[in-house]
Each structure stands twice: as C-alpha cells, then as structure tokens.
Image (cartoon, helix red, strand yellow):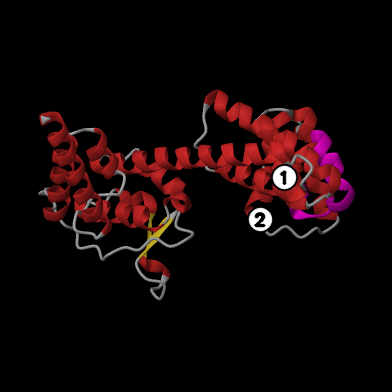
Amino acid sequence: MLFLILAVLHLVCCLLVFFGIRLGILKVHKYMFFVSLLLPFWGLLLVLILHFQIAFDADDSIDVGVEKMKLESELYKSVTVDDKKVADSTVPIEEALLINSAGERRSIIMDVLNDNPKEYVEFLQKAGNNDDTEVVHYAVTAMVEISKENDYRLQELERKYSLYPDDNDVLCEYTEFLWSCLSQNLMQGQVEVLNRELFSTLMNKKLEHSSDINDYSRLIKNELKRKNYFEAERALDEMAYSWRDTEEYILLKLEYLASVGDGAQIRKLIEEVENNKTYISAKEALAFWKK
C-alpha cells in the first residue's frame, strides 16, 4: 500500500514537472522530464537544482555585456544579434561559445534547443566540446535525441520501402532523409559504414529511372567518403554525359583526382577549364587546386 502511494505521488510530481516545463515555469529543457520520471526522487531533485541554477545564474564569472543573441537558420558558423545590424555585429560561433559569461552561453544553447536543434547540428557538435559542463550537457543530450529521432524515422522508411520497393516517391523520400542523416555526421563506426553502403544502393536504383545532377553529386560524394574510387569514377563518367561543363562536375572530378593522388590529371583538368573559360563561382576552390 505504501509503495502504491509513493508511486502515485511520484507520478503526480512528474506531471507537475511536465506542465512546469511546457508552461515555462521550470527553466530546464523538455528532456529533463524523462530524467525525473525514470529516476524517482533524485530526478526531481536534479530538475529543481538545474532550474534554480539557470534561473539565478549560479556563476560568478564576469559579464562582458554582450547583447541577447539570436541564432538564424544558417548560423552554423556565426551568431547574429539582429538581421538589420551591419556585418560588424556578426560574432563567429567559436567566439560566441568562448564568451566569459555562463548566462550568455547557456542562453545561446537554450535558444537553439527551443528553436529546432536539427538545424544546428554543427553548432551542437562544437558546443559539445565547450568548457562549460552545462552547455556540454545540453548539447550532447540534444545530439543523442536527434540521433534517436533519426533512427526511428529511418526504421519507418525502411519498413515503408520494403512494402513498396517499386514506388519512386518512397525511394526519393528514403534517399533524401538518409542523405540528410549522413550529412549531419552523427553516425559513427559500423553504423555509418552500413548506412553509406545502403545509400549507394538506393541512389543507384534511383538513377536507373531518372537522372539529376544533385543525385549524381550525392552519390559521388558518398563513394568518396567510402573510399570506393571505382564506383566514384563510374558515377563521374555517367555524370559527364550531361554535365561535363558544370561547376559541380568539375569540382567533384578535382576532389576525386585528389583522392586517388593523380596530380597530372588535376593540372590537365584545370588547363581545360581555363582554356574553355568555364565559369567557376568558387574561385578559392579552383585556386587551391592550382597550387
């Protein structure tokens, strides 16, 4: 009987934590609800400690007077204060994470978590190496949650594809999401190896029915990541039929030649580009290969 009363009391407290987080009363992230639920008493205590630490900023470091920062959709590399500000008001993300104010750093990470963490994976990866243990905690927790959501979605798409293997829309949806996951660089070890192999298989099947420069680009980049240079060369040859003079093809070909260490062919390709006066917007990339 006592156990039942304690269990009910625990669930009631967890519900209060849940609504407290949803209503913004508790200044902790939503993931902390599961900590309070799965860790009776101590989880609730941890939530309250974090709440008061954030609320009262239990840190005596010096405030450098930086304005409230807002992360925009392309802020993998910088944090802007205001869209209307001049370029001088843009702060590189490395500097933002080194600000000598725990409050500002935690405000930045909370803005990311409350917005859409999936759009700021690169920022979260850098934040995961920060000296502030609380910033690291939130960043790592968010990346783990993103990985879990990705795995769940991939499992759904795998089941859907197994049911409709000849449905091109399903194939496109599967390859698009899988590429998005691979681009986040959250997969590691054998998991990444298997998913890159799967992506190559799916993309080759997709290219049997339709060809698109972005599909070829993704396939080649994936094969280069796998160090599968034979398949990368084959895809480049196919891509050359329709897009030989495009910037995308030229840069991919240079990357392939560099991967296999063929300096003579790199120089030859650059000469062809210059003689044909092919427009390359990424001047720095071409200048790099000319050195």
Q: Is residue 244 magenta?
A: yes
Instruction: Check residue 79 in the rendering and tell me which mark sits there, or answer none.
Output: none
Which residue shows up at 19% across the image and 51% down it?
16
Which residue shows up at 79% across the image and 52% down it?
212
Q: Which of marks 1 and 2 is nearer the N terminus?
A: 1
Q: In which quadrant of the rendered view does residue 206 lie?
A: top right
Q: Does the magenta stretch include residue 240?
A: yes
Magenta-highlighted residues: 233-251
In this view of the protein, which residue sits in the foreground, 271 or 27? 27
Which residue shows up at 33% across the image and 52% down it?
95
Residue at which label 2 appears: 282
Contact? badges 1 and 2 (CB < 8 Å): no
Q: Is mark 1 on a helix, strand or loop?
A: helix
Residue farthest toward the right in the current orientation of the protein: 241
Residue farthest toward the top in the current orientation of the protein: 190
Residue at which label 1 appears: 171
**Gap between marks 1 and 2, in whole Å?**
32 Å
Q: Is mark 2 on a helix, strand or loop?
A: loop
Quarter of the figure with the N terminus: top left
